[in-house]
Image (tube, rainbow, N blue to C red):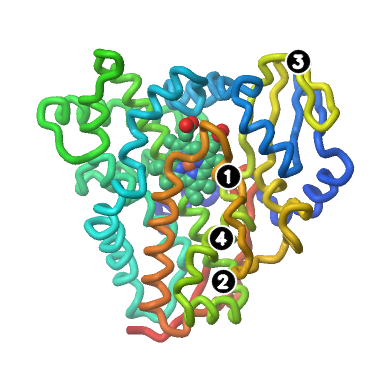
Amino acid sequence: VPDDFDLFADTTVGDVRDPYPELAAARRDTPVLKREVYNAQTFMVFRYADVGEVLRDPETFSSTIYARGVEMVMGPTILGMDAPEHVRKRALVAGAFRRKALETWAHSLIEPTVHTLIDRFVPRGEADLVREFTFRYPITIIARMLGIPPGDDQTFARLSIELISLAVDFGRGMAASRALGDYFKDLIDVRRKEPEDDLISSLATAEVEGRRLEDEEILGFLRLLLPAGAETTYRLLGNLLFALLSDPPQLEALRADASLAPAAIEEALRWEAPVQFVARRAMRDTRIAGVDIPEGSSVTCSLGSANRDETVFADPDRYDLARDAAHHVAFAEGPHRCLGEHLARLETTAALTALLERLPDLRLDPGDRDPHVHGMAFRSPTCLPVRFTPA
Ligand code: HEM
């Protein structure tokens, strides 16, 4: 019986298995690559230093490039805003994602969610960790943090997946976007009257310069937090598990010394950036690495390429948990640097710790399947068939 994972899985955009040889060639030969798309000038930026320069200069390289595409689906979001509006709006939710604020969620929500998911397959001695674990997990966390009642999880998950997979079925994605809007509007009304300790309540009662947020503004946040919070962490966790399971000595090293977990996670973010591209619009004539960029051009940064830049990371194609990879750009850089990075790390650490504790001799067991990381815009493994001693 197909479930919501099947719905999601056949929608991953671009079945690209290994883009890295091409990206390496681009870093070497065409580090700033110009293309004409419908008479518009577009540039792709591949090297680490150049990507950093673009992302740290938001006055020249504006995020309003997202305004049309993303906003058609999600409503106005902070992703597509520049200063000063961006600073004001981001501040409304930033508090909830600070490391300190997240600590309460760790014990009350994140750890229990991990264990509930593991409970379901641990007696079997085998599982597909993508279908049964990584896919289910972050969406449950973000649903609770927003304040979705647990009884609505199924509906919420399904609409979220349809929204996320909009690139494949546009009509269905837009319908899901509207349905989520209606669903959230009712919830916003309820929380305005009786606020609880969740993100919908904080947004419903927040004020900017003496004015409450409009429903549409709140909806923009909610629709953004969904894919931002659910799809990306799912991919990070999958990539991390794939890297470790494909390299048993490194998995054992981690088992023997749990203090390696943070480095293992940063290295997974470097090795396979879950989000491969971010885009900006040039607001004036400028240059990157000697290439002229006319005002109005779109500039796309390849985070996946920057993270494998051999001038910054030696032997970049190797996953190496002994590496100091903390300066990767998987969360981007500058004012739009990922708001959820601490949450993503917290979720991933909790999952990794629990899996290693509860699944002795965890190992990849592909059988006739072919687990591998794939995707063009977003990357993560197709499946993670594993065996372990049942408990
Ligand atoms: C491994 C997991 C994640 C990755 C790789 C990731 C990646 C990114 C990247 C690359 C950006 C920058 C986009 C740009 O500058 O154009 C971003 C922004 C953002 N992320 Fe994440 N993200 C992750 C997890 C999360 C989580 C868990 C949340 C929250 C629930 C979240 C919320 C956001 C938000 C709200 C923004 C927009 C920030 C702004 O525009 O100021 N992300 N993320």
Q: Residues within 10 Å of mark 2 (few under 14, many from 20)?
A: many
Label 1 sits on a secondary structure element that is loop
Closer to the N terminus: mark 3 or mark 1? 1
Mark 1 residue type? Val
The percent position of residue 216, horizontal first and vertical second, equals: 33, 19
State the separation of the CA atoms marked 4 and 2: 9 Å
Query: Within 8 Å: ligand 1 and the Cβ of disc 4?
Result: no
Q: Residues within 10 Å of mark 1 (few under 14, many from 20)?
A: many
- Give the percent coordinates (x, y) of residue 239: 56, 60
The location of residue 10, given as percent across then percent down, is 55, 49
Give the mark nearer the N terminus: 4 vs 1.
4
Give the labeled residue for mark 2: 244
Which one is in front in this view, the residue at disc 3 or the one at disc 4?
A: 3
User: On residue 275, which mark appears?
Assistant: 1
Residue shown at the point (52%, 55%) measured from the top left: 236
Camera-side residue of 126 and 26: 26
Can you say which quadrant of the picture contains the N terminus?
Answer: bottom left
Q: How many marks?
A: 4
From the image, tell me which residue sits under label 4. Answer: 239
Identify the image quadrant of the C terminus. bottom left
Q: Nearer the viewer, mark 3 or mark 1?
A: 3
Q: Work out whether residue 179 or residue 320 is closer to the camera in this orientation and state it.
A: 320
Q: Is residue 165 visible?
A: no
Looking at the picture, which amino acid does disc 2 mark? Leu
- How far apart, in angstroms, are the residues tagged by discs 4 and 1? 12 Å
